[in-house]
Image (cartoon, rainbow, N blue to C red):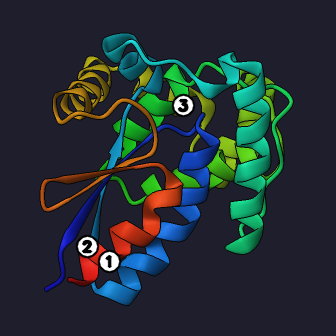
Amino acid sequence: MGKTVEFFFDVGSPASYVAFKRLPAIAARTGATIDWQPFLLGGVFKATGNHSPAEVPAKGAWTTVDLARFAKRHRVPFARNPFFPINTLHLMRGAAGLQGDPRFMAYLTAVFDAMWRDSKNLGDPAEMQPVLARAGLGGDEFMALINADETKARLKATTDKAVAHGAFGAPTFFVGGEMYFGQDRLDWVEEALAA
């Protein structure tokens, strides 16, 4: 049996999207298991004093170009979302609430693709309806899920866990207790999983 990689992510992070698309192939090559850990990036920023690269104009512009380069190199369809940044609280509650549900991966794929491939405004409920439908969720079911106390507690616990382990942004990976930050460190993650 291979090692496990903990993958802490937020769907509002374009770097998390690129990692989401690349990580399954890495896990397959190394025989690893992915431990999906949806967290709230805004909560991590608040707890650690970190900020989005988008808040620094020069860094934000460079990051967009750099991500596009990585996406092209790894054949990941990527488009800058003109609605970025989007408050992802409800989206991440959806991910946390669906952990253990067979629709979890369909939900993540639908949300990530809508956000970073199709450039949808997922802060608009009308834009969310077809995304939820692709994941096999109805609007009422989704609202009940994201408003459940258990869902809120799970997302908070995962966010707190990430901060306690030293995470300060997304995506963050842990392999055997070692932390790797950023989708551009996936080569190192693969080396750690293969060792």
Q: Quadrant of residue 54?
A: top right
Q: Is residue 168 left or right of residue 120?
A: left
**Residue 48 against residue 155 in the figure, above or below:** above
Compute the Cα span from label 3 to label 1: 31 Å
User: Mark 1: which secondary structure?
Assistant: helix
| Residue at 19% over, 32% down | 161
Q: Is residue 108 left or right of residue 43?
A: right
Give how far across and how far down residue 18 sits, in percent: 61, 57
For residue 106, say whether it is visible.
no
User: Mark 3: which secondary structure?
Assistant: helix
Q: Quadrant of the N terminus?
A: bottom left
Give how far across and how far down residue 68 sits, in percent: 77, 55
The answer to whether the residues at label 1 and label 2 have Cβ atoms under 8 Å apart is yes
Q: Which residue is mark 3?
A: 91
**Residue 54 against residue 192 in the figure, above or below:** above
For the residue marked with disc 2, what is the amino acid?
Ala
User: Mark 2: which secondary structure?
Assistant: helix
Dot in front, 3 or 1 = 1
**Residue 134 against residue 151 in the figure, above or below:** below
**Residue 91 against residue 70 in the figure, above or below:** above
Q: Which residue is mark 1?
A: 191
